[in-house]
Image (tube, grey):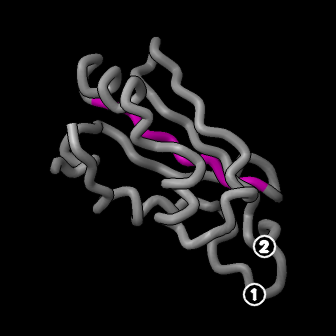
Amino acid sequence: MIKLFDMVDVVRSKNSGPYELTFDILFKDADHFAAFVDKKIMTPAVFAGLYGIDESLVESVIAFPPAKAVKITIIRPMASGDLGEKDIYGAQQHSPLLSFEYEV
């Protein structure tokens, strides 16, 4: 098992509008990116389980080879700025990905 955090340069989250969050995973090298994508390590079901959300809230898991990146977009649990919403910019939602482990 390896930690995703050890294979990437960047893991971040951000708003992708008031009703969606986007998570970016940018790999250090093409080999680890290709293995991650080819083995379908991150699926909507895996991401939903990691975040404790319904799989239907995961809109997309997209690989972007030129950047060695995977982009995941979900429907926000609460709209950005709603009363009770705790992260208006969506910038603090990536932490569960930091400890994510998978088999190579």
Q: Which percent across, then down, holds residue 55?
A: 67, 58
Q: Is residue 2 above or below residue 48?
A: above
Q: Which residue is mark 2?
A: 78
Q: Which residue is mark 1?
A: 84
Image mark for residue 25: none
Q: Which percent across, then down, holds residue 102?
A: 27, 48
Q: Residue at x 56, y 54 (%)?
A: 45
Report helix, strand or loop for mark 2.
Answer: loop
User: Which amino acid does the dot numbered 2 rest on?
Assistant: Met
Work out which residue is located at the far bottom of the displayed protein and give it.
84
Left or right: where does residue 101 sit relative to residue 54? left
Left or right: where does residue 93 sit relative to residue 39? right
* Between marks 1 and 2 in the image, the one whose residue lies nearer the viewer: 2
Asked if disc 1 and disc 2 are in contact, CB closer than 8 Å, the reply is yes
Cα–Cα gap, marks 1 and 2:
8 Å
Q: Which residues are magenta?
A: 20-27
Q: Which percent across, then down, holds residue 7?
A: 23, 38
